[in-house]
Image (cartoon, rainbow, N blue to C red):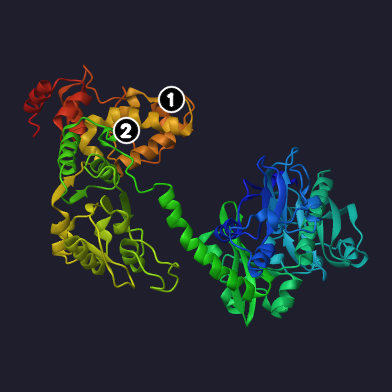
Amino acid sequence: MLVRNYMTLEPKALWSYNTLSDAAFLFYKYQIKGAPVIDEQKKVCGIVTFAQLIKAILNNLPLNEPVRTFMCVNVITVKPDSTLEEAWDIPVKRLPVVDKDNKLVGIITKSTFLRAFQAQLERANSEIDAIIRSAHSGILVIDSYGRIVTINGGGARLLNVNAQEVIGEDIAVITNEFLLKQVLVTGESRLRRRAEINGQNLFFSTAPIMEGMEVVGAVTIIQDTSELQVIIEKCSSLQTEAQLLEAVMETTHRGIAVIDENGDMLRVNKFFEEMFGYNREDIIGSSAADLIPEAHLSAAVETGVPHVYQLFCHKGRAFLLNRLPLFVEGKVTGVLGEFISFDGNQLKDLQKKLTVLEQQYPQEKAEIAGMHAARFTFEHIIGQSRKIIQAKNVAAKAAASNSSVLITGESGTGKELFAHAIHNASERQDKPFVCVNCAAIPAELLEAELFGFEDGAFTGARKGGKKGKFELADKGTIFLDEVGDMPLVMQAKLLRVLQDGRVEHVGGTSIISCDVRIIAATNKDLNKMVLAKAFREDLFYRLNVINLQLPSLRERMEDFGELTATLLQAICAKLKIPDKKLSAQVIAILRSYGWPGNVRELLNCLEKLAVMTGAVEIKPNHLTVLQIPLQQLDHCGTGRLASDLDDQAEKAKIIEILHQTGGNRSVAARLLGIHRSTLYEKLKKYHIG
C-alpha cells in the first residue's frame, strides 16, 4: 500500500504570509487539526498545528500575525511512493506529502491510516466469505470443541450432508477423520491427508485458526485435486492481514468503536474500554445510542457524510469525535467512531473566537468580490419564437420603468436570467443587483437577512451587526426569488418596507431609508395562494404591477435548434473540450420530449451528452446516457412525413406531431417537413381539429 493511493489530494494549506486569523478560519471551516505552510514556490517550509494555534491565541498574538513567526519549521515529510507502513511509523499526526522538489502534493493523517486499515479488514473479510461461498472444493470450519461452524456447498456435496442441519454438530457426525480434532490439540497443520468417505477418496488439508498463541478452531479444505494448496495459502494470507489490521486498532492511542448500519456495537479497542469504563464483552451487540448517546454515531449511517473533530461531552468529560462512515460496494454498512480525549475548555474558547471570525468573513468577502452585480443582458436570452419575443418585449418595457415586476413560470424557464436583464437595461444598471432566494433561507433568519441586525440582537449575531439585503441594494434592484415560499409573517413585514421605503434592523431602533426596485419571481400560482390565504393579497398587488409570464420550453419549440446549439457550444467551452454538435435526428428526438425541467433540464442533458460522448457529432445511439423517457420518432429518425405513407399512417403521424408540439401548427409543419398551408389542407382532409 503506497501513500499516493491514500493521501488527500489538494490539501488545505497556508501560505507563509497568511495570518493567525487566516489559519483559525481555515481550521474552523474545514474542521482540520493542522495545515502545512508553503512558500512562494509552493514548497513546504513549515506546519501549523491546532495546538500551536491555541497557544498563539492564548498568548494574545494579534490576529494579523503571520504564521511563519510561530509555525514549526522542522517538518517531517514523505514521498508519494513511500509505503503506508513507513508513514505509519512516523510519530506525527499530519504528514505532508511532497514531490522531488519538496512541493506539496498531498497530506496523510492518522485517520487516513485507520480508514485504510479498516477498508483492508473489510476487504479481507469479504474475500474470505466469497472464497468460502464460491469455492468448488469443500470448506469446513470447526471451533475449538470440534463443532461445525461453517460448511460450504462443496463440502456438503462431497460429504453428502445438509449444510444447515449439521451446523453446530460435532465433526464426528459426518466423518471419523480424527486428524481434524488432532489439529486442535497440536496446533499443527495437516496437509493432504487422504481418507475414504461415502466411497469417495478425498484429500483433507487442515490448518489451525489462531488467536495469538491459542488455537480457537480449524479450517479444512476437502478436495480431490491439487487446488487445495492454493486456497489454503490464500486463506492464510487473508488471516494474516486481518490480524495486522486488528493489531493496528488495538495499538492506536485513540478510542475506536465500530457500529453496524443498525447502530449496534461491532467492535471496540482497548483505549475505548479505558476511556468509557466498558468491557468489550459486555457491550458488543448493544446499541451505541444507549451507551454513548451524546456521540450520535448513527448520524453518519443516515447521511453517509463524515463528521470530523466534533466536540461532545460524556459524563463531564470533553472529547473530540470523528464519525467516519464505512462503505461496502457503495452502501454505508457502519460507522467508525474515533474518540480523542482532551481539555475541552480551551477548545470552547477557541470556538467562540472562530465563530466571530466566520461570521465576519463572508460579508466582507462578498462585498470585495463584487457579488452584487447583474451578469446577464437581453442578448443572453436565446430565441426568436413568438412567445419569447413577447416576453422580451414585456421585460424591455419593465426595464424602462421603475415599477415592481413579478416574473412567473415553471422551474428552469430563466426567471433569474430575465431579472438580471431587466436590471441591466434599466437606469439602475450601475447600482447594486442583490439576489435573495426566499426558499433557501430559514424562516427564523430571513428577517435578519433582508433587513439586517444590530450587535447582540440575538444569540450568535456577529459582532458589530450586519447590513441587510435591502440596504445593500440601495439605489439598485433587489431580486426576491421563490417569493411564493416566504412565510406569512415575513410577507407582512416585507409589505411594510415596500410601502414605506424604510427598514429597521433586527434589535435596532433607528430607521434606514432605502430606494430599492423590486423584482420578484415564483413558479407557484399566487392567485390560488391568495384565495387559499397562503399569500397576502395586498402584497400580491404590490409585487404584481408588471407581470412577466415566461413560456415553458414546450411552448417555444421554434427556438429548440438555436437553443441547443448555443448551449452546447457554451458547455464545451466551459469544460474545455472540442466543440460538438447534435445531429438532425437527435434534435428531432429531443424535441419530442416534454422537458418538465425546461431549459435547466435541457442544459443538464446537453452537458451529460458533451461529457459522455467521444464523437464530434452526437447521434441517436448516444442518447442512452440520458435518464429521460425519449422516444424514436420513426424509421427515418425524424418527424418528417414519408412520401409512401397511406392515409391512416399519415393522419396518425400528423396527430402525433401536433401532440408533441402542444398543438402549435407552425412548429408541427416544420417538423413534418411541409408548408403550413399544406398542413391546414391535411387537417381539413382528415377532420383533425
Find disc 1 in the rendering and name its residue.
Answer: 579
Element at badge 1? loop
The image quarter containing residue 326 is bottom right
* Nearer to me, 168 or 623: 623
Mark whose residue sits in front, 1 or 2: 1
Q: Earlier in the sequence, mark 1 or mark 2?
A: 1
Find disc 2 in the rendering and name its residue.
Answer: 590
Q: Residue furthest bottom?
A: 315
Q: Is residue 82 above or below residue 620?
A: below
450 relative to 136 in the view: left or right: left
- How busy is the neighbourhood of tag 2: few (under 14 within 10 Å), some, or many (20 plus)? many
Tell me the residue at 20%/41% (across/down). 551
Q: Is residue 483 visible?
A: yes
- Where does the image place residue 578, in percent across and percent down from the top left? 47, 25
Three-letter code, disc 2: Leu
Q: CA distance from mark 1 to mark 2?
A: 19 Å
Q: Which mark is residue 9?
A: none
- Where does the image place residue 178, in percent across and percent down from the top left? 89, 63
- Where does the image place residue 151, in percent across and percent down from the top left? 73, 59
Tell me the residue at 56%/69% (across/down). 351
The image quarter containing residue 636 is top left
